[in-house]
Amino acid sequence: MRIDGHVHFVGDGSNGSGCWLRRTSLLDRIIEPVVKAQAGIFRSSQKLGVDQAYKEKLIALIDRSSLDAVLLLAMDYPYDADGNCLKSKAKFYVPNDHVLSLAKKYSQIIPACSIHPARKNAIEELERCAEQGAKVLKLLPNCHNVDCSNTRYRSFWEKLSELGLPFLAHTGGEFSVPVLNAKFADPRILQLPLECGVTVIAAHGAGKSGLWDPDYTADLLKMMDEFTNLFTDNSALASPNRWRTIPALLDPKIQSRVIHGSDFPIPSGGLGPWIGNLLSRADYSKSRKIKNPLERDVFIKKTVGFKESTFTQLTELIY
C-alpha cells in the first residue's frame, strides 16, 4: 500500500465527533479560515459543519490521488506530569474514537490513537485502542508536555512494544500548535521507548521549524545508527520552513527508514524546495498546477529524490 503516514483531522464537534477547536483568541479566528481554505472546506464547512466537510474532502482527495490510504491522527490534550488535563493549553482535540470510527467506515483511513502517558487510564486506553484497530500512537512531546525519557512511563512504553504499535513522535520545532516545553523537541528523549523495544518514527526528521529553533537532525541520524527500530518521516518538508531537512534524509543509508508524510492540512506548495534548488523552476511550476494537496506533496517528494520505498515503508511496519 502507498500510504501518506502523517495526516491530521480537523473538526469542531459540529457533527457530534467529539472534536474541539480553540477559537478564543484573535489569532485563532484569523488562522481558522486559512486552515479551512488549505483543506478546501472554506465554503462547504459553512453548510455541512467542519467535521463533515473535512471528512468528505479528505476521502475525495485520497480517492483522486495515487495513494491507497492515509494514517489519520487523533490528538490528545496535553497533561502535566501528575495526570491533570491542560485543556486550556491545547489548540485542538481529536478523540481516539473518532478516527477509529472513520477507519471502520473507510478503507482509505488507517487510525492512529493519541494517549498522553501521564493519564490515569493511559495503559487501559492504549489496550482499548489497539483492540479497536489503532495501528500507531501519535504524540507531540513538546506540545503535549511529554518527557518520553521519564522512567515513570516505562510501563507505558513496554505495553506499546508488546502491542506492536509504532510511536509517531513529533521532533524538532513547532509553531502551528502551542509548545509547552521546547526541550521535548529533542529526539534524544526517545531513547527510553526505543530501549523498551518500541518502533519509533521521529516526525519531520527532527529539523527546524522556526528560524531560532535548534536543528536536531544530526542527533537523530546518529541515533538511527544505534537503534535499528528508529525511523523518520518527511512530513511537512515541502513547506517553506522545513525544506532544509530534505538533503539529510535523501542519504541512501537513511532512505530505507524514511516514511512519506504530508502533514496535511499544513500547506505543501514546493516553494521551500525550489528556493533551496531542490526543485527546478519547471518542476515547481508543475507542482503549482496540481490542485490535490496530497498528490502535490507526492509529486514534490518524488521529484526531489525520495524513493518509492518511502511510500510503502509504513505498510511494512503496521501490517
Image (tube, grey):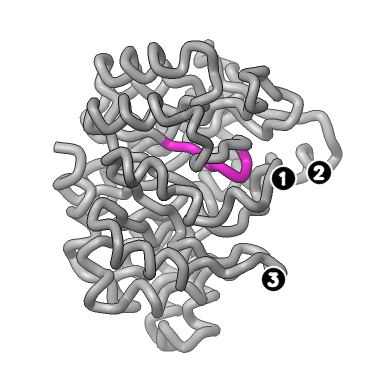
Q: Is residue 184 left or right of residue 129?
A: right
- The relative height of residue 118 versus residue 286 in the rendered view (above or below) is above
Q: Is residue 141 magenta?
A: yes
Residue designated by label 3:
211
Query: Along the polypeptide, which appears first: circle 1 or circle 3?
Result: 1
Q: Is residue 281 magenta?
A: no
Quarter of the image where one finds residue 13: top right
Residue designated by label 1:
31
Range covered by the magenta-colored residues: 138-143
Q: What residue type is disc 2 on?
A: Leu
| Label 2: which secondary element | helix
Q: Residue at x 37, y 32 (%)?
A: 157
Q: Position of residue 279 (x, y in %)?
A: 41, 83
Labelled disc at residue 144? none
Q: Position of residue 221 (x, y in %)?
A: 38, 69
Q: Is residue 59 left or right of residue 289?
A: left
**Circle nearer the viewer, 1 or 3:** 3
| Label 3: which secondary element | loop
| Mark 3 touches mark 2? (CB < 8 Å) | no
Q: Residue at x 23, y 48 (%)?
A: 314
- Tell me the CA gap for discs 3 and 2: 20 Å
Labelled disc at residue 27? 2
| Mark 1 touches mark 2? (CB < 8 Å) | yes
Q: Is residue 52 left or right of residue 113?
A: right
Q: What residue type is disc 1 on?
A: Ile
Q: Position of residue 278 (x, y in %)?
A: 42, 84
**Structural crowding at the residue carrying mark 2, measured as other residues with C-alpha within 10 Å and reported as few (<14), some (14–19) or many (≥20):** few
- In front: 111, or 80? 80
